Amino acid sequence: MPKRYWWVILTYIAMQLSGGIFRPVLLRLFPAHQLEALILYSIFSFTIGLIIVLILMKPDMQMSQTRSKWFTSDVIGWTVFGVFLAYFAQGIATMIEMNVFGIRTGSENTQAIMQITRTVPLFAIVPAIIAPILEEVIFRKIIFASLYKRTNFFIAALISALIFGIIHGEPEHILIYASMGFVFAFLYVKTKKIIVPIIVHMTLNSISVIYQYSLTPEQIEQIEQQWNQIQMILIGG
């Protein structure tokens, strides 16, 4: 693994941990606007992290540009197919979680993100744009690709997908996160362009943010209950 990849991973870890490190300072500096200060710092840290990662990955981006153009009809086609494939995989994983393991639908991680976004709408750029770029570079371009060179697709995709799921802090939904990780890894292998899983990841997150931002928490809970009922009718339980 190139040395710059380790610096990318360290940058990502530092970005994730910096919030906890600077939290006491922010709370003291902005006692009247503590939540807003924490959110704005999160936006700042993610943005700085993205800039550093893009600088470190510049040699890879230049190599990709010399091989072929980033946006072609093939890329667009795989992106559209990837969105549908990701939703299909997510649906299957959700059904397994519900009907095999009895896990309730809904993501606390997503709900927390939406609460933050409603407080500071600018935060939407993090889950919709910044996070997908960082996560695909790290989990697919670096971790998956490095493992894929030494093992096979299944092992490399499984390990990278599990890490991808664990990092989101919802072990009960590891199957859903892992299924998405498999789809992103598949798209990367088939197209050999990291831009494809990045765009698919961005699209999924953006749709989720826009959809949930337009609904109240009560409406979201009602939709989840209706979805649970539909699942019970279709599968029988």
Image: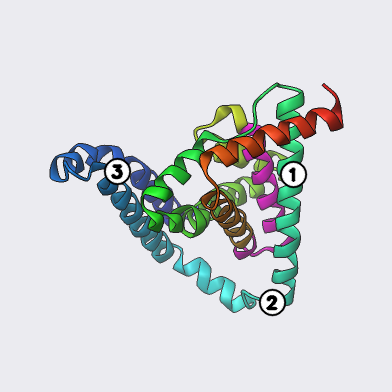
- Indicate whether 63 appears above or below 50: below
Q: Which mark is residue 18?
A: 3
Looking at the image, is mark 3 or mark 1 nearer the viewer?
A: 1
Q: Can residue 51 be seen in this view?
A: yes
Which mark, by number, is residue 29? none
Q: What stretch is highlighted in magenta?
A: 174-196
SS for dot 1: helix
> Disc 3 vs disc 1: Cβ atoms closer than 8 Å?
no
Looking at the picture, tell me which residue is in the foreground, 17 or 84.
84
Read off the residue under disc 2. 72
Residue 74 in the figure: left or right of residue 233: left
Percent of width and height locating residue 25: 17, 41
Give residue 89's mark: 1
* Label 3: few (<14), some (14–19) or many (≥20) C-alpha neighbours in 10 Å: some
Residue drawn at 25 percent across, 38 percent down: 21
Label 2 – label 1 distance at C-alpha: 25 Å
**Left or right, residue 214 beside residue 57:** right
Indicate the quadrant where residue 121 lies.
bottom left
